[in-house]
């Protein structure tokens, strides 16, 4: 089953490029570069395969975090709309006013 339940399969998948994937991919790359720097290797040139691997792992984790986040928000929205549907007396519609009824009339002073 994993962190996202089977119920989430009905939701559309998130985009491949999303904020969590980008941030965690950059964090993975920074981790690999920092590891090179700590071990006194050329920061950007050494271990390019590890840099790519860390970016890929960060991107994968970010994608699945986004998937889990979308599921949680969809579940909250569903529960909230279900509550509103079952308790309509707590969410009565207010009377609609026009903008002219809200704003005081303007009288220019000269």
Image (cartoon, grey):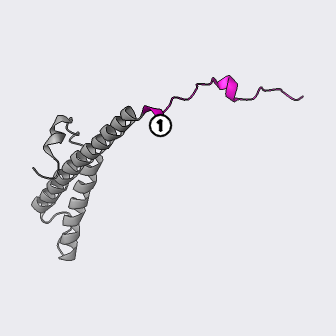
At x 14%, y 66%, the residue is 46
What is the quadrant of the C terminus in the image? top right
| Relative to 102, 28 lies left or right | left
The x, y position of residue 52, in whole percent, is 14, 56
Q: Is residue 36 above or below residue 48?
A: below
Q: Nearer the viewer, residue 78 or 18?
A: 78
Kindly state the secondary structure of the residue where label 1 is placed: helix
The x, y position of residue 67, in whole percent, is 22, 45
**Quick one: which residue is furthest to the bottom in this view?**
39
At x 47%, y 33%, the residue is 89
Q: Nearer the viewer, residue 62 or 43?
A: 62
> Per the image, is 98 magenta?
yes
> Per the image, is 60 magenta?
no
Q: What range of the chain is rendered magenta?
A: 88-110
At x 24%, y 47%, the residue is 66
Disc 1: CA contacts within 10 A as few (<14), some (14-19) or many (>=20): few
Question: Which quarter of the picture shows residue 44?
Answer: bottom left
Give the residue pinned by disc 1: 90
Q: Nearer the viewer, residue 95 or 49?
A: 95
The x, y position of residue 21, in whole percent, is 24, 50
């Amino acid at each position: 089953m994993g962190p996202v339940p089977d119920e989430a399969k009905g939701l559309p998948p998130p985009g491949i490029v999303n904020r969590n994937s980008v941030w965690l991919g950059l964090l993975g790359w920074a981790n690999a570069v920092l590891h090179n720097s700590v071990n006194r290797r050329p920061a950007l040139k050494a271990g390019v395969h590890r840099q790519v691997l860390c970016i890929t792992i960060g991107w994968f984790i970010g994608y699945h975090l986004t998937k889990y986040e979308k599921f949680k928000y969809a579940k909250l929205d569903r529960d909230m709309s279900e509550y509103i549907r079952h308790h309509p007396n707590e969410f009565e519609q207010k009377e609609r006013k026009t903008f002219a009824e809200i704003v005081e009339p303007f009288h220019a002073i000269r």
